[in-house]
Amino acid sequence: MNTLLNWKKGLFKSTYQLLASGIPCGFLKVKTFRNNTEGELNNKKFIFENKGFWKSETLIIDAITNAQIAVIKYDSWKNKAVIEYSENKYRFEFDNFWHTKWNILLNEEVVASYKTSVFYTKGEIFSNSADELLILTGIYISNYYMQKTAAAAS
């Protein structure tokens, strides 16, 4: 099933609003200076909880059952990540130098493809999967690396 979504967020805002055909269908609310982020897509709710500092990872928790359902492991030196979910290992990789395009891959197949404006205020998601967790995770990881870059620059 192919999915096309758009997202938008204000320049200094912390919430990504997801839209399907212009109709709100979800969000990702990044809590600045906190270790967790809330996300929802198509009424499926998740919590992204950061763990560790040097060997950083993020647990993804089903917000209804409080069960851990996935984990993100970061390779900060290469700005890549692995998503361990549903007995699979998905890869997150940026597709260009400016980090305005990125993909989630399973083996060598693109599962979800993202692109954004230069200022990260709007973007587009194309996925050949309707998996809400994977779609939100792509935005979450991109935001994670964007915050790391901003922190390093300051």
Image (tube, rainbow, N blue to C red):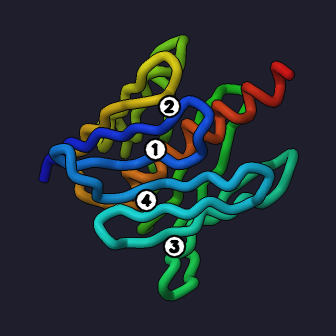
Say which of 150 and 74 sits in front: 150
Q: Residues within 10 Å of mark 3 (few under 14, many from 20)?
A: some
Q: CA distance from mark 1 to mark 4?
A: 15 Å
Task: Judge left or right: residue 84 versus residue 58.
Answer: left
Q: Which mark is residue 93?
A: 2
Going from N to C along the chain, the mark reached first, 1 or 3, is: 3
Q: CA distance from mark 3 to mark 4?
A: 12 Å
Tell whether 113 sits left or right of 139: left
Local secondary structure at mark 2: strand
Q: Amino acid at mark 2?
A: Glu
Tell me which amino acid carries mark 1.
Gly
User: Mark 3 belongs to which amino acid?
Assistant: Ile
Q: Earlier in the sequence, mark 2 or mark 1?
A: 2
Q: How many labels sit on residues?
A: 4
Residue 102: percent from left, percent from top? 43, 29
> Where the C terminus falls, by quadrant?
top right
Picture disc at residue 88: 4
Closer to the chain start, of discs 2 and 3, is: 3
Note whether 120 is above or below 85 in the view shown. above
- Label 1 and label 3: CA atoms lie apart by 16 Å
Label 4: element kind: strand
Whole-angstrom CA distance, mark 2 to mark 3, is 21 Å
Question: Which badge, 3 or 4, is on the more N-terminal residue?
Answer: 3
Q: Residue 65 in the image: x percent, y percent?
A: 51, 88
For disc 1, the neighbor class at 10 Å (few under 14, some 14 to 19, many from 20) is many
Q: Residue at x 28, y 54 (%)?
A: 24
Residue behind mark 1: 138
